[in-house]
Image (spheres, grey):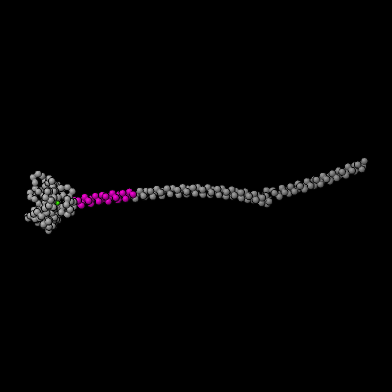
Amino acid sequence: MEATENDADSENIYMNEEDADKTSNQSGIYDSIYMNTTTESPGSAGACERKKVILSDMAAVALGILCVLLLAVIIVLCIKHNTELHQIQSHNENMTTERDGLQSRYNILNMEKDQNQLQSSYDTLRSEREAMQKKLKETEFCPYGWIRFLSRCYLISTDKRTWEESRQACIRTGADLVIINSREEQQFVSEFHTNIWIGLTDRDWEGQWKWVDNTALLSGYWMNNEPNNGGHHLSNKDCVELVPVSIGVTSNWNDVKCSNVLYSLCERFGTAVNNR
Ligand SMILES: [Ca+2]
Ligand SMILES: [Ca+2]
Ligand SMILES: [Ca+2]
């Protein structure tokens, strides 16, 4: 019994020792915890260090986020800038094209304007020239003894000559045998009431009537059945006389021999100088 009690006591002691060990170990843990709790208490150096690390990490994260945001903003701005730049370039190209079109149109309008001005100037100059020519003709003079008609001067010969002699006499005065250019002139020439040579001949080529200035006859005032070159007695009648017939002044030309002798009518321009 005593042994059993001793064993029980031993066991209790042992158990107390184990408990004491456990208590001792727990006490060590608690001490450690206490130590830890006492070492990480606010205001301690470790806690400050850890707070600094945490704050540093947070700052790094915030800075990283800020950098990412900044980069995103930069990218967005770059894209927007490029888009706007492209739009500006496109707009600029459109403006350039439009400007070139307007410049071209402006040049065409200027050319048309210049052309219209030139045409207007030309018309004005032509009108002035015609007015001056008319005024000049009005102030032209015929030599003494000559007759003025429609700005031309005429002289009836005082002698009868052959056609060629008559022509040479006219040329010596600065004139030539009369060339009938109009009905008015035909009317005027017909008023001399005598047969006269006019400056028309076909002596170079039979049937081809030419004036003394070498122009071809377009229409004439021939008598009936004239010109006949001599009719049944073909005799090279190559020069033209104007016959003052009463049947009318529109049919009084006749071809006769150039060797006939007749009066003649010379015609010349007026002069700006009065030779009277
Ligand atoms: Ca004439
Ligand atoms: Ca003839
Ligand atoms: Ca005849």
The residue stretch that appears in magenta: 108-134
Does residue 121 appear left or right of residue 74 in this picture? left
* Residue 161, image x, y percentages: 8, 55
Residue 131 in the magenta stretch? The answer is: yes
Residue at the top extreme, as displayed: 1
**From this viewpoint, is residue 48 visible?**
no
Residue name at image x 49 percent, y 49 percent: 82
Residue name at image x 59 percent, y 49 percent: 64
Residue name at image x 40 percent, y 49 percent: 97
Task: Pick the quarter of the image with the N terminus.
Answer: top right
Residue 143 in the magenta stretch? The answer is: no
* Residue 99, image x, y percentages: 39, 49
Task: Pick the quarter of the image with the C terminus.
Answer: bottom left
* Residue 231, image x, y percentages: 12, 48
Choose between 188 and 98: the one closer to the eye. 188
The answer to which quarter of the image holds residue 173 is bottom left
Choose between 208 and 33: the one closer to the eye. 208
Choose between 46 and 116: the one closer to the eye. 116
